[in-house]
Image (cartoon, rainbow, N blue to C red):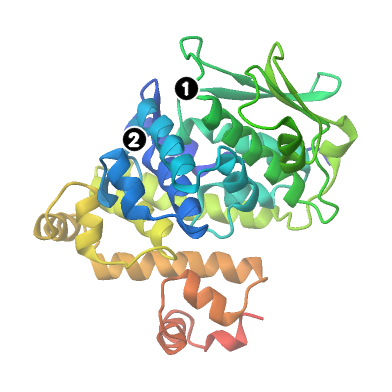
Amino acid sequence: MGSIAIQHWADKLVPRIGGLKPDTVSANFVDRILRGAVNMGASRPRLLSALHLNDAPLRNPIGSVSRTVLINLFTAIEREYADPAIGIRLAMVARPSCFSDLGFVALLAPTVGEMLQTTVDIQSYRQNVWRAHLDRDAKPVRLVWALPKDDPGHLDACIEFSLASYANYYRSCLPARIAPKIARFRHQPRFAETLYAELFGCPVVFGADETCLEFEHSQLSLPLPNANRDLQMTIQAKYAQPMAWLANGHKHAGLSYLYLAGELNKSPLKLARLAASFGLTERTLRRKLVQEGYPFRDLLEHVRRDLCDLYKLEGRRSMSEVAELLGYSELSAFTRAHKNWYGVPPSGLIE
């Protein structure tokens, strides 16, 4: 049976809010990098101070920052660790792990090739500084980066992180941990070439005509162990709701849904934090959500149930893990919520 392309929900969001401006990256993309650095031991307040930013705007699901902020972020992280390879290390240990992560749906694709293509397709929601294109007709298959022509090398660390992210997706999606065939960079090495090869798990060439990753064509048809087309379709159906709300003028409800879905497992789910991410007072956002028919507590419950439906369909998580991913600090609170939603305790539905 032929492959069936499934559009990522983020593609439907762009027409509602407008695409990223040139030379900008999404706040979500910057926050993902920050979280990775903090998980490896960096100081988030110190990094934010170096960027002259605060937390709130980075939690805005449609927020963005400039190319300069992204460059300064990698500079600050390298300074924090005194390690010019830290960006690659970050990319090599971090990957989407749950439904609160934008790119997690790619790991549910049927094949390695579709996983790579899905990741390429959602880059317009993450950043508008460079573009990666998957050329399946090339021999070997090439994932090519179209880079800005006006950059004198300031983006080199960012580009290394980007290539390493794709390489890590590729290596980690299969039990055999197959590496790309070769990595090519247009720029010159910023540290020992042997360390690049060690981190990428494949030969690395510098001073190339194009920046790209090359893959064996036969590997793109390899099936992914977590492939789940039904789950991909269900994800689309869930996110069709906030897209419809945005289309019907319920802007604050739609964006709040996206905020909550992305933050369930990451930060306290408080109305004050949500309001601050949109640059509003808590009172103002509470009033607007009520006016649009989605009071905060009801909306939070709705989002939690939606994602719980996804985890149940996925069928790979323990009850305690699902509770944590939905933002419950105690298993008993999740058990009560589950009974309210489905009429039975979670132990009867989640293995």
Q: Nearer the viewer, residue 48 or 327?
A: 48
For image coordinates 50% across by 15% down, the residue present is: 148
Q: Nearer the viewer, mark 1 or mark 2?
A: 1
For this view, does 95 lie left or right of residue 43?
A: right
Tell whether label 2 touches label 1 (CB within 8 Å): no
Q: Nearer the viewer, residue 50 or 296?
A: 50
Q: Quadrant of the C terminus?
A: bottom right
Q: Is residue 252 above or below residue 197?
A: below
Q: Nearer the viewer, residue 72 or 3?
A: 72
Quick check: can you spot residue 155?
yes
- Identified by mark 1, the residue type is His
Q: Position of residue 117 (x, y in %)?
A: 67, 34
Residue, disc 2: 64
For image coordinates 31% across by 67% down, the residue present is: 269
Identify the element where label 1 is drawn: loop
Identify the element where label 2 is drawn: strand
Quick check: can you spot residue 254?
no
For image coordinates 52% across by 31% down, the residue present is: 158
Q: Position of residue 144 (x, y in %)?
A: 67, 21
Q: Position of residue 13 (x, y in %)?
A: 41, 38
Picture quadrant of residue 52 = top left
For image coordinates 57% across by 39% down, the residue present is: 7
Residue, disc 1: 154
- Identified by mark 2, the residue type is Ser
Q: Position of residue 191 (x, y in %)?
A: 64, 31
For this view, does 178 lie left or right of residue 152?
A: right
Q: Nearer the viewer, residue 34 or 82?
A: 82
Q: How many marks?
A: 2
Crowd rating for badge 2 (residues with CA inside 10 Å; few <14, some 14–19, many 20+): many
How far apart are labels 1 and 2 at the CA level?
A: 19 Å
Q: Quadrant of the N terminus?
A: top right
